[in-house]
Amino acid sequence: MRTYDVSPLFRSSVGFDRLFDLLTQAERVEASTAWPPYNIEKAAEDRYRITMAVAGFTPDEIDLVQHDTTLLVSGRSTGPEGERQYLHRGIASRSFRQTFNLAEHVTVLGASLENGLLTVDLRREVPEALKPRRIAIGGAQGTVGQDNAPARIAEAEPGETQEPGARSAEGARTGDSARGRGQPEAA
């Protein structure tokens, strides 16, 4: 088995503790976690299902505990083992303990035991405060900082000349100078 030293990543990363914990946990996986066999399936966009083969166990012998982002499934067999004499024993009835790491906001909806299969239904429920929300942009109908009104040019009477900076009759009424619309006059 290959091992990777992730300690240099700890020095330059902030807020990734959970990811590093998962990496170090994955290194310590034991062969005993392969029993009982299980499936994890994605039932819908925000729904998941864990199915475990726990033949021989009753609902009273199985415990499910969710603590924060961890789901612990454990089983203890209380059957009459001492009274039976087996010629061949192929069905295991040993106790087990299986831990599942859940993403944030994943909750257990319920569990059922039918035909030796334990089914645990999960749902990811992101709080409204953490969901993305669309923000409407308010403002005037026109583009900010631009006058969309048509330009009006006052024509000088024949024989009159207009000096630069002088106001036409129209400009005097609207407050515009002859040099440019809305430009401040030089003092």
Image (cartoon, helix red, strand yellow):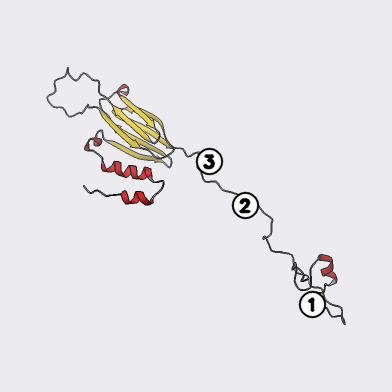
Residue lying farthest to the front in this orientation: 11
Q: Which residue is mark 2?
A: 137
Between disc 1 and disc 2, the foreground one is 1
Q: Residue 116: horizontal and vertical position, in percent?
A: 28, 28
Separation of residues labelled 2 and 3 (CA atoms): 20 Å
Asked if residue 130 can be seen in this view, the reply is yes
Q: Residue at x 79, y 77 (%)?
A: 164
Along the viewing direction, whichever of 4 and 173 lies nearer the viewer: 4
Q: Residue 147: horizontal and vertical position, in percent?
A: 72, 64
Q: Secondary structure at mark 3?
A: helix
* Lateral position of residue 97 relative to residue 130, left or right: left
Between disc 1 and disc 3, the foreground one is 1
Q: Give the mark, 2 or 3, whose residue is nearer the N terminus.
A: 3
Q: Which residue is mark 1?
A: 164
Amino acid at circle 3: Ala
Separation of residues labelled 1 and 3 (CA atoms): 60 Å
Q: Which residue is mark 3?
A: 129
Amino acid at circle 1: Pro
Q: Residue 14: horizontal and vertical position, in percent?
A: 41, 48
